[in-house]
Image (tube, helix red, strand yellow):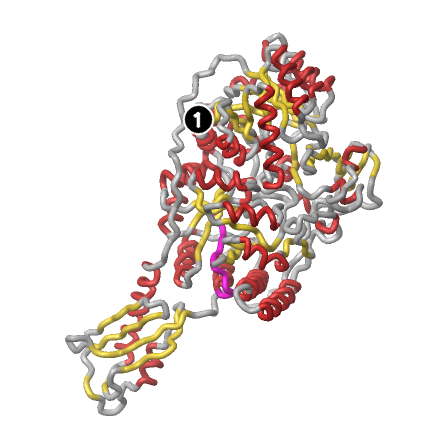
Amino acid sequence: MAELLAPAGSLENVLTAIDAGADAVYFGGKGFNARKFAHNLDDAEIGQAVRTAHLFGVKVYVTVNILMADTELEALSAYLQRLDSFGVDGIIVQDLAVAALARKVAPNLPLHGSTQMTVADLDGVRFLEANGFTQAVLSRELSAQEIRFICSQSSIPIEVFIHGASCMAYSGQCLMSSFLGGRSGNRGACAQPCRQPYTLLCDGEPVMKHEAYVLSLKDLKSLDYMDELLDAGVTSFKIEGRMKGDTYVRTVVSAYRKVIDAHYQSPQQRKAAHREAAALLESAFNRSYQADFLGNCVSRHTLAERNPSGRQTADDVVGGLIRKLSIYGHVDVAEDGNLRLTLWDENGHTASAVAHFQPEPARQRPATADYVQGQVGRLGDTPFVLASVTVWDETKMIPASVLNGLRRQAVQDLIDSILADYPRPAAGTAPDWQSPACPDESGQAMELIVRCDSVDGVAAAVAHGADIILFGGESYHHHPFGTKAWQAAVQAAHEHGAALWAATPRIVREEHRAAVQNELERAIAAGIDGIYAGAMAVFTMLEDLNVTLPVRADWSLNIFNSQAAQVYTALGCTAVTASVEATLRQMKEMVRLSGCPIEAVVQGRAEMMVTESCVISSFAGKGQKKGCPGVCARGAYALRDRRDETFPVVTDQYCRNHILNSRDLDMAPYYKDLRRAGIAAIRIEGRGRNPQWIGQQVSRYRRLCDGTETMLLGKEDQTVTRGHFFHGIL
């Protein structure tokens, strides 16, 4: 049976969701979750939420879905143990360090892969399953057809978002809030710069008459696809909204409850349920609605370009838990003659309590069934309502105090019986994440790595002293990398004594999986020296291809701490690229605690967003991606914000937009700090740059690496950025 999963930002929301018919609820604790500014639940509230939910047969998932700093791992360990003791049904995880730590300190906690992991194809799901996850939350950009295929082939349950606010960028791959204001979506503190207005420029000139909210998606509403998704085998249907109130929770949960229940009924009942649900959802908070990703018809219509704030409704519904569980009772005497009360529910749970009281015939007021019903039925704030009670003999005298004492004890025993019988899901199994010993590379020369997306760029990089060229993956020129390009790139690198490694995309969708694999095969045939994994799916793909080349983990895997670095080393990586949100101090700790070679991106434009919705086709083309005449290739596009900062927009070969930072990252003046931190390799991001720029930057860093130039710090250059090397994120 499919699961309806409801959001909760408070204990009251949890109770409201249960009352409205949710099969499961998810919420965050006071720390370690991706809704930092929600009320969230403290430990006492989590315990109460789990207890109440389980009494009603409702599962509880707790979000532990942010990137963790090394300094937080000790507190996280204790928190995971508390969640396990509460009996939660799973934790939703982004950082593999959390999964590794949970496996050690709370092995019975089921792990769910968060949408922040950017899992968008079957290979990504298989990676999660192989590493002990029991449920996968897919990226919100997938079509219903892709979801159907993944469900048909997956061995673990698949969870998809069906309603609520949607991020413009692929979740887990957005750095815009982080780089613009230090509030990271990967740490639960996103400031939502996507909900701000921008102007699209082409070659520096406005394409639009007026600025618009071109990065603000309408809210998702999947009513029209629910029957298709149910038939496809989706296990868990997730509603977004942990920042919303009780009205939103009750309204939206009630709407989808009607549709899911009606799916198994007659066509007429389905139609009526959809009609009622649609009316309910129109009254809920929304920025108007779309389901364009599910229909694979993304267009300008997908954007809430004039309505970024949404329409708030009044709190006009009752919050909390009104629904009660029906129980039944019988009063009689035990074998020793003492009074006994037996209670049971409709699922066969039974509890009995016996008083030290032996009933005698009544002289004035016998304990009739109505009298007993009145006393036993005083269930107050318990989760029960007394449906009926029977009495073995209505001629006896039974004091109210005796019945009240029996009721309290029997109710408590019945609660304990129900909770003891609750079937908590099993945790997954996975191979042991034991990292092999890394070679001691202290004192060795720092590698200079350059990422290029043109053969001319490769030639310029190696001619000026690059050690390793990173080629392929997502291009900034809207074209794939063909066989001739791979052969020429490998030849250019090897002729200068440099190595050439293949990059892989940050996003691997099911519809593009074959293209990604074909490019890998072309690269291997051309004689590459190694592969960078940009997405979790790549590890599964390489295993299927029996690739024996060395593999490194790319920065898009969000490796933010030493434990995550060790996990990827255990998965076979010979080095890892630190998250671009990590500070230099954090990288130093990663080097010290993990023993893994750590690479840092030090030069070039950081990618703020990678999006499936195309702002160029929406406002400079025909308004939709399908049938787009390729306007992205006819000029240099950018977004300008209200502070006159300009963010270049490029399109890769998969028709995804990459929104780049307005300023170049430049860490050359701090080269000595990078060396002192123990960084093993530094990378220049050169995609989309001309050979002259690449040559100049490689020459700068080559001289620094060789010790032939020492840069003295002067006045800070306001035209560049130091990223997060010296300023951490919230």
| Residue 166 visible to the viewer | yes
Q: In the image, is residue 294 above or below residue 388?
A: above
| Residue at x 29%, y 80% (from the top left corner) | 400
**Quadrant in the picture for residue 412:** bottom left
Q: In the image, is residue 88 above or below residue 341?
A: above
| Residue at x 73%, y 44% (from the top left corner) | 625
Outermost bottom residue: 364
From the top left corner, tell me how far across and down residue 136 is, in percent: 50, 46
The kind of residue tagged 1 is Ser
Magenta part of the chain: 19-30
Q: In the image, is residue 496 above or below residue 125?
A: above
Count all numbered tags in the image, as a single digit. Answer: 1
| Residue at x 38%, y 52% (from the top left corner) | 86
From the top left corner, tell me how far across and down residue 603 is, in percent: 64, 23
| Residue at x 65%, y 31% (from the top left corner) | 474
Q: Is residue 152 magenta?
A: no
From the top left corner, tell me how far across and down residue 368 is, in percent: 30, 86
Q: Residues within 10 Å of mark 1 (few under 14, many from 20)?
A: many
Q: Which residue is mark 1?
A: 594
**Quadrant in the picture for residue 365:** bottom left
Outermost top residue: 708
**Quadrant in the picture for residue 402:** bottom left
Q: Between 450 and 258, which is closer to the camera in this rendering? A: 258
262 relative to 331 in the view: left or right: right
Outermost left residue: 336
446 relative to 207 in the view: left or right: left
From the top left corner, tell me how far across and down residue 297 is, in percent: 70, 49
360 relative to 582 in the view: left or right: left
| Residue 187 visible to the viewer | no
Quadrant of the drawing holding the C terminus: top right
SS at circle 1: helix
Q: In the image, is residue 566 above or below residue 24?
A: above
